[in-house]
Image: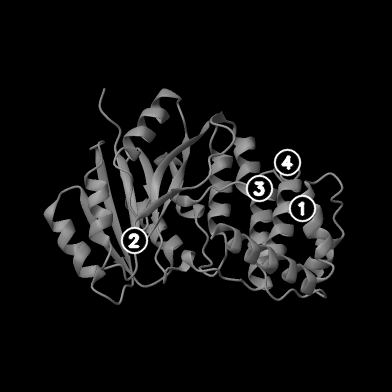
Amino acid sequence: MPQPKVSVIIPVYNAGKYVERCLESVQNQTYKNIEIIFVNDGSTDNSGSIIDEIATAAPNIMSFHQENQGPAAARRTGVLKASGDYVMFLDSDDTLPLDAIEYMVTISLQQNLDAFYGLFNRIVDGKVYTIASRDFEGVISSDEMLKNAIDPNFVYVAAVCFSKREFWGADMFCKNRNLPSEDVITNVKLAIKCNRIGVYNKPIYNYHFVATSLTSTVKFFKQECFKDFFNQLKKVLVENDKEELTKDSVRMKEITTFGFLIKDIDTKDEWYKQIMAYDVRNYPHKIKVLHKLLHWPWLLHLFINGNRLLKQVISR
């Protein structure tokens, strides 16, 4: 039986210093039936020429170029060019553990999975830190994954997703490049299409901490940006008759978003007022505390900043 082909899609933006390290980790995989698709998203450094040179050296490597549109648009371009049976995404400043693809293919075939989600390592100054394992492993249904993808306590980023190519069309990606948490909406769309999703505690991605990268910086988004995000998320859920199933997960995510990600809270905004009217009596204690503190945003931020400072002191 022939091995399925895996398409590894790598958006590239000003990553000239890292792209060859990224490529090496894919070429050295224990699994070999791989095509590599670089998408240069309007880089202003030498990234474009590097990937063009790389692509001429091997038949399974392709390079494409587009005006800067953001990582989601680059992933969309890569997916539309992919010919593999499975696809996965890899940022150009990150790497893969050497057995990552072999493990994901093996489990996906054994369990007849539509999608696979693993864990990631965080690499800081050469030291490897694996994020905490989930409290379960195994195969879950579409509806279970749908609630998990929205639940703020779960981590399902694009980097740790490996799935069948057939589910990926241009409509899977957010068109608004300034939308925060776009991975959530993509994962929700994927969960709706899949029947069997595998969730495992195997690290299959190395996230290299780079001080200047977008995701390595604590960034507070504007309330209006998150309102747009939740409007799009709810639209997808309504269109697929999943609104009631995910109601509590969405509400808890809204509350944690206000608590941890929005710096300047507009208490006169109708969305804020709607959230403050939620019945949270049956929600976890942490959510109830955040919801209570949202009545006084200044106190909420004081509490959260103090808690973060305390954790820093304890960890020293």
Closer to the chain start, of discs 3 and 1, is: 3
- Count residues near mark 2 (Cα–Cα under 10 Å), then give few for <14, some for 14-19, many for 20+: many
- Is label 4 in a helix, a strand or a loop? loop
Q: Which residue is mark 4?
A: 245
Would you say the residues marked 2 and 4 are in contact, meaning their CB atoms lie under 8 Å apart? no
Going 78% across and 74% down the picture, which residue do you hit? 298
- Indicate the amino acid at tag 2: Asp
> Quick one: 222 or 70, which is closer to the camera?
222
Residue at image location 78% in from the left, 66% down from the top: 271
Q: Residue furthest left?
A: 57
From this view, report whether residue 286 is shown above or below residue 177.
above
Percent coordinates x, y for residue 45 in the rendering:
27, 75
Q: Amino acid at mark 1?
A: Ile
Q: Nearer the viewer, mark 3 or mark 1?
A: 1
In the visual, does 189 lie left or right of 64?
right
**Residue in front for this viewpoint, 204 or 35:** 204
Say which mark, if any, is on residue 93. 2
Q: Residue at x 46, y 30 (%)?
A: 113
Corner quadrant of residue 10? bottom left
Would you identify the image quadrant in which residue 84 lies? top left
Number of residues whose C-alpha sits closer than 10 Å to that of mark 4, classed few (under 14), some (14–19) or many (20 or more):
some
Regarding mark 2 in the picture, which secondary structure is present there? loop
SS type, badge 3: loop
Whole-number angstrom distance, CA of label 1 to CA of label 4: 19 Å
What residue would you read off at disc 1?
287
Q: Which residue is mark 3?
A: 151
- Nearer the observer: mark 2 or 4; the answer is 2
Look at label 3 and name its amino acid. Asp
Q: Position of residue 220 (x, y in %)?
A: 61, 71
Q: What amino acid is labelled 4 in the image?
A: Leu
